[in-house]
Image (cartoon, rainbow, N blue to C red):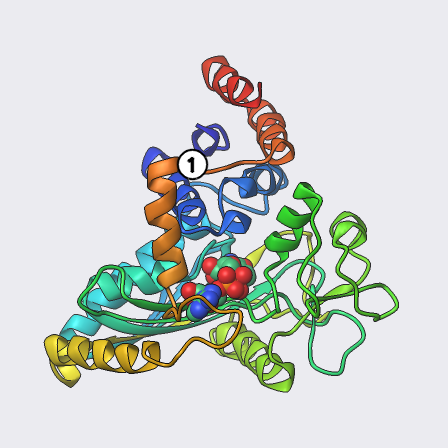
Amino acid sequence: AVGIAIGSPEDEAAEMARHLVGANLAGHDSHGIGMIPDYVRLAKAGLLVPGRSLETLVDMGALLVFEAGRGCGQWMARRAMERGIGRAREMGCCTVALRNAAHVGRIGHYAEICAEAGMASVHFVNVADHDPLQAPFGCSDARLGTNPFAAALPGKRKPSVVLDMATSAIAFGKARVARNKGVPVPEGSLIDGEGMPTTDPTTYVDSRKGALRSFGLHKGSGLAVMCELMGAALTGGQTIQPAHPRHDGILNSMLSIIIDVEAIGDRDTLADEIDAVAGYIRRSPPAPGFERILMPGEPENLSRAQRRKEGIPLDTKSLSDILAAAIEAGVPDDCVTEIRKALT
Ligand code: NAD
């Protein structure tokens, strides 16, 4: 209903809604329906353009370049993946450059779309149009967005092995969720306005003093830099360097490399090998403090199974922010009443 109220056609609004709820189901509340207030603000400011069509700038067979022009990120990125998958099926692989989409959400979703179609894929993504959030290795302040990276392979089970992560130690939305719940963020993930380590997300989330640290010292920081350059500099999207305007929007540019597994070898052999490697890793005795060993993508599968049964827990602050945003967007009264009911 909020998607429609901000001006999205039905299919686009439905895609956005499915994506946001899907992120909650996967356990990533940072990228779930808690984004609705941001989307309403962005649409009102003209920084998210509902109803935009994906524009093809380059079509060279195995290379597709698309301009999204601030269109609804979830819709633009799905369309771009569908085109890339179709082309990879014909040509064995396809590189897809998607420029300047409004927030595309959970990047793993696009890796999963590819995996479900029998494709292996890698995705480099940057985040621009707002002040930086991530302090790369050795920096005392923020210079990059949370620049996510994702990769997936199709296996026997659905969805299969999916690595999907921010290159900051935690995603910004996780600091927001922690602040709303009044809980600390993990040690080593945040610095304050003086560049000193802190676990209290309040000042950072409320007044953006401080920065999220890159994960994994210089290596994670290096991957964050490559997401900026591969995701945006190479694709022709907007990078975060200060010569480009910052409108307090969210722009994602994404470079996706999509490979048809059947063009390299065969899907069953790959799935057997994935299972064998995963089994080998899992048979390691868990280190102290670990109950079991999980593959990338498994925490999301476990969360989906649990939340489909028990529902999605939502804190009161996020719900009341969604209520205010729904009213501002002008959603019909019966929908507002439903949200009010959930709050009481
Ligand atoms: P995370 O740290 O929760 O998970 C990262 C990866 O590690 C996942 O693939 C997960 O399956 C795996 N993992 C987690 N726990 C594990 C364990 N115990 N054993 C083995 N593997 C494990 O994710 P995150 O970095 O907080 O990112 C959250 C979401 O934010 C992602 O979906 C990302 O795409 C999204 N994001 C989007 C943007 C954007 O601008 N669109 C920016 C940043 C992040």
Amino acid carrying label 1: it is Ser
Nearer to me, 256 or 287: 287
Quick check: 245 left or right of 71?
Answer: right
Res. 341 in view: yes
- Tell me: residue 192, above or below residue 318: below
- The residue drawn where x is 74% and y is 54% is 201
Residue lying farthest to the right in this orientation: 194
Residue 120: give x, y in percent of width and height.
27, 74
Nearer to me, 62 or 39: 39
- The residue drawn where x is 51% and y is 15% is 337
- Tell me: residue 209, above or below residue 183: below
Q: Which residue is mark 1?
A: 8
- Tell me: residue 329, above or below residue 109: above
Residue 184: give x, y in percent of width and height.
71, 54
Quick check: 134 left or right of 74?
Answer: right
Nearer to me, 10 or 27: 27
Residue 272: give x, y in percent of width and height.
16, 78
Residue 246: give x, y in percent of width and height.
69, 58
Mark 1 residue element: loop
- The residue drawn where x is 63% and y is 26% is 324
